[in-house]
Image (tube, rainbow, N blue to C red):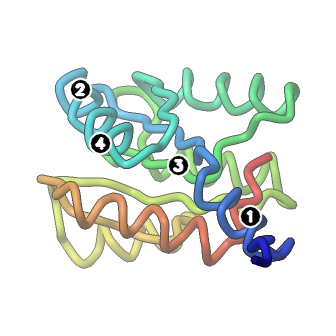
Amino acid sequence: ATQFKPSDSILRDVKDNLKTHRILSVDDDPVNQMVVQAMLKNKGFEVITAADGERALGLVEELHASNRLPEAILLDVMMPGLTGFDVVKRIRSQYPDWDVPVILVSATGQKEKIQEGIDSGANAYIMKPLKVSELSKIVMHYITKHGGRGE
């Protein structure tokens, strides 16, 4: 009997599927953070959190220095201090070669705000409340589209 030996490409596919994707979630509301963490951890994501824009930028700097950048950023729009728009603008200007997907999350769906989010450099703008199936699919869509180049 011949033994089945998986090809390198099959092994690579399996390894890619087993890979933990690192996500940075930025939200000033601890309840929202817990919900996002629970949703994404259940889908196999590693979730790093920041409670505001300044902390998020500090974390990105630390993660950049240690070559552990997240593969996507979920960013609340309305936060005290720096807004989500401010944070994405700074990330885009400070790290021009880092093509990280930034997904803005907001309770407001006003066309002007959505346009402002896209103009600031975000890849997507999604509405609260978040649904588990939608959130993980959207995050994976952008990670896949951008090649998961966080690391």
Q: Pointer 1 and pointer 2: residues touching (CB < 8 Å)?
A: no
Q: CA distance from mark 2 to mark 3?
A: 16 Å
Q: Could you tell me residue 67's position as x and y percent?
A: 85, 35
Rate crowding at label 2 as few (under 14), some (14 to 19) or many (20 or more) other CA atoms within 10 Å.
few
Disc on the earlier residue, 2 or 3: 2
Front in this rendered view, residue 3 or 17: 3
Secondary structure of the residue carrying tag 2 is loop
Q: Pointer 4 and pointer 3: residues touching (CB < 8 Å)?
A: no
Q: Quadrant of residue 109?
A: bottom left
Instruction: Between label 2 and label 3, give the one nearer the viewer.
Output: 3
Is residue 26 toward the left or the right of residue 57 in the image?
left
Which residue in the structure is indicated by mark 3?
73
Q: Residue at x 77, y 53 (%)?
A: 93
Secondary structure of the residue carrying tag 4 is loop
Q: Pointer 1 and pointer 4: residues touching (CB < 8 Å)?
A: no
Q: Pointer 2 and pointer 3: residues touching (CB < 8 Å)?
A: no
Q: Which disc, if any, is residue 99?
A: 1
Q: Residue at x 77, y 71 (%)?
A: 3
Amino acid tagged 3:
Ile
Which residue in the structure is indicated by mark 2?
29
Amino acid tagged 2:
Asp
